[in-house]
Amino acid sequence: MTGRLRFLAIMLVRWNATLLSPSRSQWAKAMCAELEAIGDDRIALDYAFGCLWASIKECIMTWNFAARVVRIGTPSALLILALIAASLAVRNAAISPPAALVFGLSSAIFTSAAVLFLCKGIAAFGRAAGALIVFYIAALLLLHSSGSLVGSDGVTRLHRALAVEGIFLWSVLLIGAVFLIRMDRASRAGRR
């Protein structure tokens, strides 16, 4: 029975070594040597799981991993938001045409931003996000100055909430774009 535990521990540490980058090869060798020095198979298995946990954290907790998550997550989240806004536009078309118009416009903006991110790159997306922040601030100011433009009080509150939400959302997306631009510059500088 204990032979199986030792075998599992050895397999975990070997697999763990494949997760690590080549610059961490000395660390992987040290883990294997430490495992051989442990006499108790149960303790060896605990050690192997600890090594695996540390290696996964090492792989995930890097700036490059964060950049990949932002690079993939941004257009994905924008397309999901576009679908949600489009479905809300359809659902509100008969109930509240002004709200449906805003949701439809939001869907078009999210879709366009995702396409811009994928086709024109991060810098173009960052410029668009900055412009949209200004647009949402202007919309919020307009809604605060003249609530009678939109109609009923509930619709005005909805539009104000969507404007505040837009300012927040596009600010976060702008920060993400700046992060990706800086990561790209750092990686290019590292290649030189």
Image (cartoon, rainbow, N blue to C red):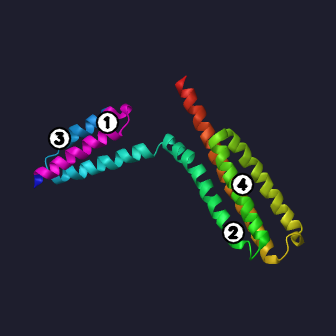
In front of the other: 110 or 168:
110
Give the alpha-carbon distance from disc 3 to disc 1, as whole Å.
14 Å
Q: Earlier in the sequence, mark 3 or mark 1?
A: 1
Residue appearing at x 38%, y 31% in the figure:
23
Q: Secondary structure at mark 4?
A: helix
Is label 1 in contact with label 4 (beta carbons under 8 Å)? no
Kindly identify which residue carries mark 4. 109
Residue appearing at x 68%, y 72% in the figure:
91
The residue type indicated by label 1 comes to Trp
Give the alpha-carbon distance from disc 3 to disc 4, as whole Å.
58 Å
Kindly identify which residue carries mark 1. 27
Give the alpha-carbon distance from disc 3 to disc 2, as whole Å.
64 Å
Q: How many residues crowd mark 2 within 10 Å: few (<14), some (14–19), many (20+)?
A: some
Kindly identify which residue carries mark 2. 90
Q: Is 40 colored magenta in this rendering?
A: no
Give the alpha-carbon distance from disc 4 to disc 2, as whole Å.
16 Å
Relative to residue 118, is residue 34 drawn left or right?
left
Residue 144, quarter of picture: bottom right
Q: How many residues crowd mark 4 within 10 Å: few (<14), some (14–19), many (20+)?
A: some
Is label 3 in contact with label 1 (beta carbons under 8 Å)? no
Relative to residue 124, is residue 8 drawn left or right?
left
Closer to viewer: mark 1 or mark 4: 4
The residue type indicated by label 2 comes to Val
Q: Which residues are magenta?
A: 3-25
Residue appearing at x 25%, y 49% in the figure:
47
Mark sitting on residue 36: 3
